[in-house]
Amino acid sequence: MYQRRTFLKKLSDSSLYILTLGAFLNHPLKGWAKWNQEAFQAKEFQKSVKAIYGSTPIESTDQIKIEAPDVAENGLSVPVSVSSSIKQIENLSIFIENNPLPLIANYHLKEGMIPEFSLRVKVAKSSNIHVMVKTADKLYGSTRKIQVTLGGCAED
Amino acid sequence: MQKTKNMKKNIRIKAVEKSGIVTVKALIKHPMETGRRKDQEGNLIPMHHISEFRVLVNGIKKMDGEWVTGISKNPYMSFKFQGKKGDQIQIELLDNLKQKSSVETIVE
């Protein structure tokens, strides 16, 4: 009986393995970005950073430029431009510290991309904007303050 | 407030090359509901946002990423890459209701 059980167990394990492998092979390059549930649903900035980058130390740098108005009248649509002169960036993410969900965007870059992005974001209340940039071996961060007259994540 | 049921092909895109650098600008029509707003009857409007996007140049993935409700309604995105005139750009979007949308253009 024992042997039969082990055999069945092994069988189910290996078929699971084959299935997973199959699923992996089925969507190689065309796959969507991996949605990081934990990072995107974290309600605190620090938690969100941890969920996405682990406990890698963040090095402050002036090589990441964040352009945004000092005072934004309408928090529903605040133009933000991010650029960096750091080479070989693999990942770039944008956080608005005081938003209900601080992580708002995460970009994975391949060769040939120039790290220069513009977008419009919602800012709930005056807050720090953090931009993190990850290279193969380091994590850099930069911060900028933004003041908002009318919040962009109103409850109603 | 009416919530958009279908994510139609409503992305406007423009890509221009200048000295080896292609600048792409895209404007996407999407409600980007946070899930915190209420309609006139006081019911919560469910979350509806673009969750993932990817950019392919000549069929090769150059960038992908995730967005969440913190991006403004009718999102605007611009990005740059090393490219040339005639490159084919494709942007594909997926929202949290699993509705897909995509747009293609040729670099001018």
Image: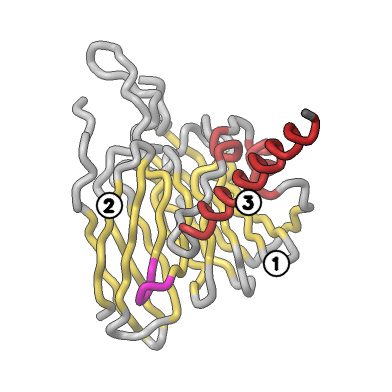
Mark 1, secondary structure of its residue? loop
What's under tag 1, amino acid-wise?
Answer: Ala
Judge whether B22 appears above or below B20 on screen.
above
Rendered-image quadrant of the N terminus of chain B: top left
Residues rendered magenta in the picture: B56-60
Q: Which residue is mark 2?
A: B101
User: Residue A91: where, in percent of width, then height?
Assistant: 59, 60
Residue A74: tell me if it is visible. Answer: no
Can you tell which of label 2 and label 1 is closer to the viewer? 2
User: Which of the chains bears the disc numbered 1?
Assistant: A
> How far apart are the alpha carbons under marks 3 and 2?
33 Å
Mark 2, chain letter?
Answer: B
Instruction: Find numbered disc 3 in the image and state the secondary structure of the residue it sits on.
Output: strand
Residues marked 3 and 2 touching at CB (< 8 Å): no
Residue plotted at (77% across, 52% down): A56
Identify residue for label 1: A136
Q: How many marks?
A: 3
Which of the pair B8/B1 is nearer the observer? B8
Residue A133 position within the rendered picture, expressed as x and y whole percent measured from the top left? 63, 59
Task: Specify the quadrant that holds the C terminus of chain B.
Answer: bottom left
